[in-house]
Image (cartoon, rainbow, N blue to C red):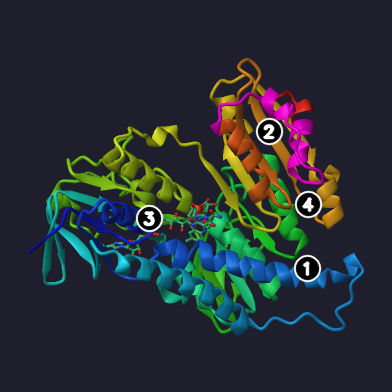
């Protein structure tokens, strides 16, 4: 039995940074990883996908070069193995630097293998037993594979497989019209594939207000992506021509034939093979580890961070979980998850930057809502860049003047949303945003104008 001050299971987005803090405090820490250091984000998530999105953007811009008065003297071609090598290099550099960082920590031991609880203080990794008074779970999530009819009879991909694909599929059929589905849909369309997105719901990205979903829908259709919403009969069968994907039972074409299928219908936590019952750690009905506001679990001495606790599904929320745990245990603070303001981005081109509530959520929560919007076609910076798709939107409370949320579907939307995100974090009213003097020419410079255009919702 090896004894440590702390054990961390999973080297994703929270675990390594926490190991670093324990190490710096002179405490011994073991971090156990069963696959790749860096977890989902580095290996099959954010890093490779955003690198691929950048290649797809380059192809798109090259095809539009004449719009800018530039000739490229020939057809735009895609060297898919080279595109993939670029993404792999970004992943490998990041994985490598994370590994060497952990390996160089004098008080940290990186242990390779699958960890499982033997008791609330004991972990088994292969033949090794480890014990510590404090254990931190950072085990992440994996792609959900629903029980679709015929799914076991076809070769399908998830985000873990498509990230290694070094060819352009003839016709990629993507099940799921949200983050993963839409980022891959646009990317592969730009690489030259025929792409169909199949969404069970009535609209894509249904978390967002209807006009945002509609704008994204139109922008993807304008690039030639076929979107089938309300697909109530998703099923698969192999045919001589490819994979037949059943879409609808009674409306439109009942099925589409694809060469390749990507499943992007959500994720499930990696909590089913951890032996949590032996430790007494409780899960909710969807398998997420139940945590309090300080990320402690139902068992004293065990905490859960990142995707596995169901309190966030992003790299920045996993990292913030680490910050909360480290601040509370090592810095004497009392930070809480409920203090976190949620922002995120969908990395289509243009991207959607989001923070706080949607208009729909704000109205439902009983606020007296004011809404301001502006099309990107009336944003000077977007016009100059020749990228005028999308809109800016702000949602505020008429009585308290609090900013409740914002959306920015448009060029630079992932960055320019931070003007609002930072104001909200600082607790500023919409007057502060109204009287800010942003830089010209930027997308952000329009936030004061959007505030001035606000009207009652509905
Ligand atoms: C395609 C895709 C694109 C994404 N893009 C973005 C983006 O642009 N921005 C964003 O914010 N988020 C993005 N995400 C989400 C982001 O990747 C995750 O929210 C983030 O990685 C969660 O981090 P984590 O530390 O909770 O888990 P993970 O990064 O999944 O790490 C968990 C680690 O635990 C290990 N593990 C699990 N069980 C055990 C065990 N029993 N023993 C030992 N090790 C174990 C796993 O191997 C893994 O390495 C994306 C996700 C996907 C799939
Ligand atoms: N830009 C980013 O930050 C980013 C990018 C990719 C992934 N992610 C993370 O990865 C997670 C997973 O992404 P995702 O797109 O797979 O999941 P998601 O939960 O965001 O969306 C799943 C989509 O599939 C649909 N769906 C669900 N079950 C279905 C079924 N049985 N049949 C047909 N359609 C079905 C849903 O209606 C939804 O539109 C997200 O929660 C997100 O946090 C983030």
Give the left or right position of residue 77, taking residue 126 as reference: right
- The earlier-in-sequence mark between 4 and 1 is 1
What residue did someone put label 1 on?
A: 61
Q: Residue at x 89, y 72 (%)?
A: 70
Residue 447 to residue 191: above or below: above
Q: Residue furthest right?
A: 69
Q: Residue furthest top?
A: 399
- The earlier-in-sequence mark between 3 and 2 is 3
What residue did someone put label 3 on?
A: 268
User: Marks 4/2: CA distance?
Assistant: 17 Å
Q: Is mark 2 within 8 Å of ligand 2?
A: no
Q: Nearer the viewer, residue 263 or 424?
A: 424
Q: Which mark is residue 394?
A: 2
- Specify start and end residues of the magenta stretch as a single range: 425-450
Mark 1, Cα crowd under 10 Å, few <14 / some 14-19 / many 20+, is some
What residue did someone put label 4 on?
A: 389
Percent across and percent down for residue 62 are 79, 72
Give the left or right position of residue 77, taking residue 122 as reference: right
Percent across and percent down for residue 31 are 26, 62
User: Marks 2/1: CA distance?
Assistant: 29 Å
Secondary structure under tag 1 reads: helix
- The earlier-in-sequence mark between 2 and 1 is 1
User: Marks 3/2: CA distance?
Assistant: 32 Å
Q: Find residue 300 and report its image quarter.
A: top left
**Quarter holding the C terminus?**
top right
Mark 3, Cα crowd under 10 Å, few <14 / some 14-19 / many 20+, is some
Secondary structure under tag 2 reads: strand
User: Marks 1/3: CA distance?
Assistant: 36 Å
User: Marks 4/3: CA distance?
Assistant: 34 Å
**Which quadrant of the picture is home to ligand 1?**
bottom left
């Amino acid at each position: 039995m090896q004894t440590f001050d702390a054990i961390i299971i999973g080297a994703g987005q929270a675990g390594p940074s926490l190991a670093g803090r324990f190490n710096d405090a002179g405490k011994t820490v073991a971090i156990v990883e069963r696959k790749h250091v860096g977890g989902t984000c580095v290996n099959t998530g954010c890093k490779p996908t955003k690198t691929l999105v950048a290649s797809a953007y380059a192809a798109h811009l090259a095809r539009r070069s004449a719009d800018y008065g530039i000739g490229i003297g020939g057809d735009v071609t895609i060297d898919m193995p080279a595109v993939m090598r670029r993404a792999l290099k970004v992943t490998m550099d990041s994985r490598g630097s994370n590994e060497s960082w952990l390996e160089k920590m004098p008080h940290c031991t990186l242990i390779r293998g699958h960890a499982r609880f033997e008791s609330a203080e004991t972990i088994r990794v292969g033949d090794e037993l480890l014990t510590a008074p404090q254990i931190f779970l950072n085990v992440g999530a994996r792609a959900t594979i629903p029980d679709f009819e015929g799914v076991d009879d076809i070769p399908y991909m998830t985000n873990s497989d498509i990230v290694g694909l070094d060819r352009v599929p003839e016709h990629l059929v993507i099940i799921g019209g949200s983050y993963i589905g839409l980022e891959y849909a646009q990317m592969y369309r730009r690489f030259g594939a025929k792409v169909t997105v199949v969404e069970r719901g009535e609209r894509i990205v249904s978390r967002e207000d209807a006009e945002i979903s509609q704008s994204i829908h139109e922008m993807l259709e304008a690039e030639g992506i076929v979107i089938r919403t309300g697909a109530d009969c998703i099923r698969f069968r192999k045919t001589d021509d490819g994979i037949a994907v059943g879409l609808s039972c009674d409306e439109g074409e009942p099925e589409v034939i694809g060469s390749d299928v990507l499943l992007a219908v959500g994720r499930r936590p990696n909590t089913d093979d951890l032996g949590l019952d032996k430790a007494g750690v409780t899960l909710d009905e969807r398998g997420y580890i139940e945590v309090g506001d300080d990320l402690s679990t139902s068992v004293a001495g065990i905490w859960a961070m990142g995707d596995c606790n169901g309190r966030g599904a992003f790299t920045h929320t996993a990292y913030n979980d680490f910050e909360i745990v480290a601040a509370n245990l090592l810095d004497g603070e009392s930070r809480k998850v409920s203090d976190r303001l949620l922002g995120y981005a969908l990395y289509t081109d243009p991207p959607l930057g989001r923070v706080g509530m949607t208009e729909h959520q704000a109205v439902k929560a009983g606020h007296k809502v004011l809404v301001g919007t502006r099309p990107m076609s009336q944003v000077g910076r977007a016009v100059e860049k020749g990228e005028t798709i999308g809109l800016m939107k702000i949602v505020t409370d008429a009585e308290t003047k609090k900013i409740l949320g914002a959306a920015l579907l448009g060029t630079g939307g992932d960055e320019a949303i931070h003007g609002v995100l930072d104001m909200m974090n600082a607790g500023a009213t919409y007057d502060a945003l109204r009287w800010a003097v942003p830089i010209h020419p930027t997308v952000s410079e329009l936030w004061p104008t959007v505030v001035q255009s606000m009207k009652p919702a509905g």
